[in-house]
Amino acid sequence: MINAHVLGTGGYAPKRVLTNQDLAEMVDTTDAWITGRTGIKQRRIAAEGEVTSDMAVIAARHALAMAGTAAEDLDMIIVATVSADMPLPSCAVILQAKLGARRAFAFDVSAACAGSLYGLNIAAQFIKTGQARRVLVIGAELLSRLVDWSDRNTCVLFGDGAGAMVVGPSPGPEAGILSMHLHSDGTAAGILTIRGGGSQYPQSEDVLARKMDKITMNGREIYKFAVRVLPEVILEALEANGLEVTDIDHIVPHQANARIVESVLGRLGIPIEKCWLNLDRYGNTSSASLPISLDEANRAGRLKKGDLIAMMAIGAGMTWGSALMRW
Ligand code: ACO
């Protein structure tokens, strides 16, 4: 069977920077609290009028250029997002039109912060079976419009951005995605939600008045869940490939919180130096965080041919997973 590989990466974050100091003027918080509890120093906020697909287009163009792929040659576009331009149609078809990727079929994936991993796995299956030769996988989120800016529990955490991966057949048998492991636990659905605006609580004045169109979360439960399942899913991936923790050259994580990443790596015995961390600059960009991190590590020349890369992500649902990839 054909092996799938990431042939190009791209990323984008809006220009406007919102620092912890800026937030301290908006809600009852401090730079020391945010930095100490999360590792976040600043985040990017989309400009007025800028929408999710606008960010996705820029990330996509960078990834396509690196992969040497024309938009017209794409067979498939997957956008992982919970903050699409609009409820209908998908962000992916809007992106398709903006890119001029006429041949591609396009759809969104809703798996929150784990969405890019879910999208990457779908792409890999289509490549492996030969049904597609070039797939664009995007994680793009504009969470600043879904955050309650008066809620200090959540507004300090999130940022806007987009990341892209062009997936295709591996150039050789030694490189490519070795395996992916995805999981969900819907019994934990209430930990992180936007309850309003769907079929249960359709948009109404009452929904808006009760801020049910904004993110609510139980941060402590997410934390406990994440530090339990992420080490498990990395070990699951290593075991499936007969590899050891020490074989991992790089960890590319979804970045929700530096303490979560440090705790997971500590439990696995992986030095933090092997991990690409950027949430001090971007905050939690949800599905965008993993492809942005992969792109930054890639463009910084960190990833060498033959290196073993372990990716991990967790998000609302709960949804989580891992991928092992030989660069
Ligand atoms: N500034 C100052 N104080 C704050 C802030 C803030 N921004 N936010 C909360 N507090 C207060 C709380 O009100 C609470 O005060 P109280 O004791 O008087 O009630 C106190 O700080 C402690 O609150 P906790 O929630 O217990 O703090 P905790 O140590 O758990 O840290 C945090 C909170 C950072 C949210 C942590 O639980 C966490 O990182 N959880 C993961 C959440 C996450 O990553 N969500 C992102 C989406 S999901 C994903 O991407 C995987």
Image: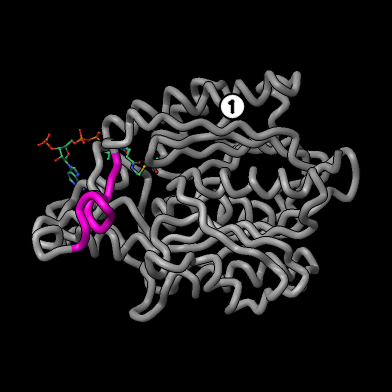
Here the colouring is one colour
Q: Position of residue 290 (x, y in %)?
A: 54, 49
Residue at 59 percent of width and 67 percent of height: 59
Residue at 70 percent of width and 58 percent of height: 135
Residue at 79 percent of width and 42 percent of height: 176
Please tell me how crowded label 1 is: few (under 14), some (14-19), or many (20+) other residues with Cα within 10 Å. Answer: many
Q: Is mark 1 within 8 Å of ligand 1?
A: no
Q: Is residue 199 magenta?
A: yes
The three-letter code of the residue at mark 1 reads Ile
Q: Nearer the viewer, residue 221 or 204?
A: 204
Q: Is residue 277 left or right of residue 191?
A: right
Residue position marked by numbered label 1 in the rendering: 234
Q: Secondary structure at mark 1?
A: helix
Q: Nearer the viewer, residue 7 or 85?
A: 85
User: Main structural element of the magenta stretch: helix, strand or loop?
Assistant: loop
For residue 295, which quarter of the picture? bottom right
Q: Is residue 62 above or below residue 148?
A: below
For residue 76, which quarter of the picture? bottom right
Q: Is residue 130 magenta?
A: no
Q: Which residues are magenta?
A: 192-203
Residue at 18 percent of width and 54 percent of height: 212
